[in-house]
Amino acid sequence: MSIPFASQHTPSFPALLQQLGASVLVSTYQAGQLIILRAEGEVLNTHFCEQEKPMGLAAHRERLAVGTAYQLWEYANLPAVADKFTDPVIHDACYLPRTVHITGDIDIHELAYADDGELWLVNTRMSCLCTLDSAYSVVPRWRPPFVSAYDLSDRCHLNGMALKDGRPAFVTCLGKTDNAADWRANKASGGLLMQVPDGRIVIEGLSMPHSPRWHQNKLWYLESGAGQLCTADPETGKKTLIAQLPGFTRGLDFCGRYAFIGLSQVRETAVFSGLPLTAQAGERHCGVWAVDIDSGQVIGCVAFTGSVQEVFAIQVLPHRFPVLLDIDDPLVRSSYSLPDAALAEIAAPDPVTAAFEQATQQHREGNLDAAIDAYRKLLAQAPAHIAARYQLGLALTEQQRWQEATDALLSVIAEQPGHAEAHNSLGLCFAARENWPQALSHYEQALAADRQYAVAHVNRAMILLKLGRLTEGWEEYEWRWQTPALTPFECPQPRWQGEAINDKVLLVHTEQGAGDAIQFARFLPHAAKHCKKLVLVCAESLRPLLASVEGVAETRVPDAALLDSFDYICPLMSLPRILGITLDKLALTSPYLHIPGYISVPEFTGDKRLRVGFRWAMDDSDLQSPCPLEHWLPLFTLPGIVFYSLQTPVSPAESELLMTHGVINLEPELGDYARNAALIDQLDLVISVDTPVAHLAGALGKPVWVLLGPHADWRWLLDRDDSPWYPSMRLFRQKSPEDRQAIIDRVRLELSGTSSQSL
C-alpha cells in the first residue's frame, strides 16, 4: 500500500521560479515518477508523469531526454498543444513523447546534449560514456583509463558528466577500480573527479561524488556522501565548500546565480552506511534546495514526504508552467508537428470537427452552460452527429437536468442501440428519479454491449443494494476495483475468496471513507474465524477504535503493512460477499465496537437533562446535509434537553451561534474515533446527517437518528424508517430538496416527548 505523496515548501521557492520564469523537472527512480515543480501564484504546483525508473535528464532547445530502466525517451515541446491547457493557469510548454530508444539495462545516470545536438549518456553499468545509433543499443565512446574492458558489472560506478565548450569534459565515479562493483569497498572516501578525454584525476578521496557541472567558468560537483555543493579547481584540484545541505545531494542544475540541488533521504543501508552524512546528527530530507552560489546561502526549498524519498536528477526548464504528457494521453494521439513547408499545404480544418472540439474543451473545463449551448448549435447544423448528441446528454446529466438529458440520450440509442455509455447515463437519469426498473434495464443494456464496463457494473450494484438484493449487489460491487475511482492494494499475495485458510494470516484493509470502515467492521469477527490471524490495515484515526473489534489480532497503518507479514489479502467491503451476508444477517452482533479502556475524556456530569449530540454537515461542506445549522435552531428551545455539537470543523460564526443558543461545542475535545466514541457513549441520543458519526453511534449501540437527503445512499435502502444495519437507528427522510425545514420540524416533534427512558 503506497504512502501518498506530500510536499512542503518555503514561500521563497515558487517566488524564485516566478522571478526566473522557469520550472524544475525532477526524476525519482525510487518512486517511478517525473515531477515538474511549477509556480502557481504564491504556491508550488507539482505535475507528475509516471515512468519506469526514470534517472538521467537533459534539455536542449525544444528537446527533452529521459533515461529510464532500459530505454531512452526523447520528448519534443509543442507550444501549440500547451494552448489547450488553461486550468489552473495558462501553460507555456507541452512536452510530447517523440522517440523511444531501447538501450537495455545500463543505468543511464546522466545525460547531456552536446552543442551539435548529439546526446551523450553516462552508461554506469558498462563504466563508459556513450552515444546513440539506431543500429545499436549504445555506442561506447570513452571509459576511464583504469577500466580495462567493457562489461555490465559496474566496475567503478561512473555516474556523472559535465560538458565544457559543448563536449564531455569531466566525469565522476565512486572508485578507481577495475573489478565488478569493487567501488563499494571504499565508497565513503574512494570517489574521483576526472577530466575527459585524458583521464587525469582532478581530485580524489571524495565521498560518493555526483553531478559535475561547468557553470560560469567554474567546475561544480556534489559530494553526495557528505551532503555538499562544492567547486574544484581543474588545475590544482583545490576543493571549495559552497553549501552544506541536509540530505544526500544528487542532481544539480543552474539558472544564473542559483543552483537547484536534489536531496535524498538516505537510510542506514548497506549502500549508504558509513558515509559522513549518515554519521551527522540532524534530520535528512528529500526534495529540491535552491542555493545562491555567490553567497552559499539556501534561499528556498521544497521537501517531499510520503511516496518520494529519493531524488535522482534535476533539470531546470525555461518555462513557467510546462506539462509533460504520458504516452497514453489522448493529446499525444491528436497532436502533430510538421515542417513549415508541409504546414503551408495543410487543409483548413473541418468546421463541424472544430466546433465539436471547442464544445468538448468547454465541457472538460467544467463550463457546462457554454458546452451545452455549443453542442446544440453544432447539432442544429449537423443533426446526425451522434458524438455531439451523447456529449450533450452527458452535460445535461451533470447539471441534473434529468428529462432533457433523457431525451438527448434516448435519441442516441435510437440511432445506436448498442451505445454502452449512453445506456449507462440513462441509468443515472432514471435512478435520480427513482425509476429503478428502468435504471436497471439501461445498466443491463450497457453491460450487454460491453461486459467489461466497470462503471456500469458498479452503478447497477448501487441499485441492487438499495433494493435489498444484496447477494447480486455484492457480486457486482466487486467491479469497483476496475474503475478509475479506486486503486487496488498492490501485493503478490492472493485475494481471499472464502477458501479455507485456517493456518494462514489474512490482511484486511479498509477502503473509501471512515463511515464505510466503521459500518463494515462488523464483519471482521466472522472473517477472523476463517484464518489463524487477522491483521487490519486502516487509517491512524481509526486504528485505536478498530483494534478493539473482536477477532482483530493486530492493526497497522498503510505504510507499516509489511508485505512479508501475511498470506492472503481482502478489502474490508468485500467481506459481505465472501461471508454470504443477506439483509437478515446485517446487524449480526450489535454493538460491535467498544471503547478502549485507556481513553480519557471529560465526563458530562451534574445535568439531569436529556443529552443529545448532533452533527449537521460533513467535514468539508454541507452538501450531504439536508439541514444546515440555521435550520436546527428550533430544537435548541426544547425544555429538558442539553445539546452537544459533534461537528468539526466549526467556523467562528457557527461557534458564536452555538454559544448563543446554549449548545455545548465539543469540537476542542474531538479527536480520533476512539476518543469520539467515548464522548458519544455519554450521550442519550445522537442526531446526525449521513456522516461517520451516525455509523459510530450505531456501532456503539447508542440511539441515533439519521437525517437523509432526497437521494439517500444505497445503504439506507428504500422507504424505511429503521435500518437493518443498526438496531438502535431511526431514519428521517427528506422528501424533496425544498423539505429541509420540514425534516427538522419532524425531529422536533419526536424530541418534544422523548426521555432517556423512552429511548
Image (tube, grey):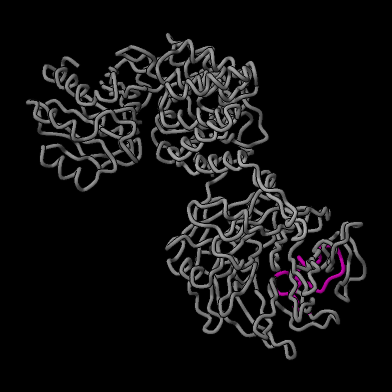
Quarter of the rendering occupied by the C terminus = top left
One can see residue 268 in this view: no
Between 362 and 341, the one lying in front of the other is 341
Residue found at x 62% / y 85%: 240
Quarter of the rendering occupied by the N terminus = top right
Q: Position of residue 333 (x, y in %)?
A: 70, 44
Quadrant in the rendering for residue 260: bottom right
Is 187 included in the stretch rendered in magenta? yes
- From this viewpoint, which residue is outermost toward the left? 639
Q: Position of residue 561 (x, y in %)?
A: 56, 40
Q: Which residues are magenta?
A: 172-194
321 vs 480: above or below: below
Residue found at x 64% / y 66%: 315
Quadrant in the rendering for residue 193: bottom right
255 vs 184: above or below: below
Name the side, left or right, on which 103 lies relative to 427: right
Q: Position of residue 716 (x, y in %)?
A: 37, 18
Residue found at x 59% / y 15%: 445
Between 165 and 95, the one lying in front of the other is 95
Between 371 and 466, the one lying in front of the other is 371
714 vs 675: above or below: above
- From this viewpoint, which residue is outermost toward the bottom? 236
33 vs 290: above or below: above
